[in-house]
Amino acid sequence: MIKRENNKFNYASCTDIGPRYLVNQDSLECSIDNHCFVLADGVGGHQGGEIASEFVVKTLLAAQIGLSQKSTVPSPKQILKQLVLDTHLQLKTLGADKKIEMGTTVVTGVIIDQQLHYTHVGDSRLYLLRNNLLALLTKDDTLKQQVLDSVTLSNGAIESTVPANIVTQALGLSEEINVHYSYLDLKHGDVLLCSSDGLHDVLTLQEMQEQLIARSSLQQCADTLVSRALNSGAKDNISVLLVESSLPLFETLIHQVKSTFR
């Protein structure tokens, strides 16, 4: 049983269509008052990718807002996984009605009483920066990840031989989906990074970590990450959403002073 309390979180986001596409198939949204967020990436090559990602973001965010407003939340794992499964079925119905294939990856988060509950399907990712170290919280549903899990080839060999953009499941396209769920107790000063593959397929973990550590503000960091991806040759749509668990005031001032003298 989880009780909801008010905590201070800051949010920032940035998205860019990239140089190759006529539409942005990425979609993202957050509710500052209700401490929840969703990021989705319409599956490339499908006509309804942009419709799918927008539908999933709006549907899941509305459901998560309703959940976060409850005074107590029993069985968050079961509830959140079911929300994604229900949205998947609704998206399949929408695609059948429009007679087009609609698919999207998704990563979601709800923060209740300083505890993050997150789900994901596909290759949109969630990272955590804590004590100036960036770690990946999610695991991609991709062919590349399946190969990494099952063979003894070096990572370098896999990077050069296995395409990075083949997802093994997506909302609206797969007959059945396995919704991944986990939770994390957040600490003051933690930063969450949500991204579509347009960002993390181009920037390394080290590059993203450096930008997060050097940030002068959360919005500046989001903008810079997208700009760096574009300058590094990104071809896909690029999206990033940042969530920061605020530090106590004296620690915030120290962080700002350090940033000034970097």
Image (tube, grey):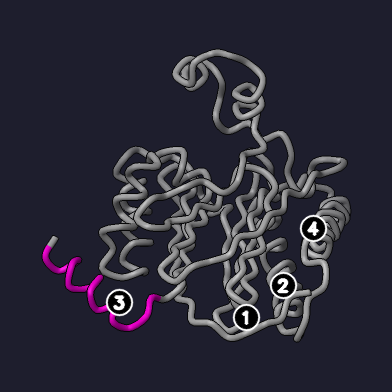
Q: Are marks 1 and 3 in contact (CB under 8 Å)?
A: no
Tag of residue 252: 3
Badge 4 is on which residue? 81
Q: Earlier in the sequence, mark 3 or mark 4?
A: 4
Q: Earlier in the sequence, mark 2 or mark 3?
A: 2
Amino acid type at mark 2: Gln
The image shows residue 243 at horizontal and vertical percentages of 48, 67
Badge 1 is on which residue? 34
Q: Residues within 10 Å of mark 1 (few under 14, many from 20)?
A: many
Q: Secondary structure at mark 3?
A: helix
Tell me where residue 231 sits by quadrant: top left
Q: Residues within 10 Å of mark 3 (few under 14, many from 20)?
A: few
Question: Where is 18 relative to 258, above or below?
Answer: above
Q: Are marks 4 and 2 in contact (CB under 8 Å)?
A: no
Q: Is residue 95 left or right of residue 106?
A: right
Amino acid type at mark 1: Asn
In three-dimensional space, the C-alpha distance between marks 4 and 1, rounded to whole angstroms, equals 19 Å
In three-dimensional space, the C-alpha distance between marks 3 and 4, rounded to whole angstroms, equals 35 Å
Which region of the structure is painted magenta? 247-261
Badge 2 is on which residue? 64
Q: Residues within 10 Å of mark 4 (few under 14, many from 20)?
A: some
In three-dimensional space, the C-alpha distance between marks 1 and 2, rounded to whole angstroms, equals 8 Å
The image shows residue 162 at horizontal and vertical percentages of 56, 20
Residue beneath the point at 45% across and 76% down: 10
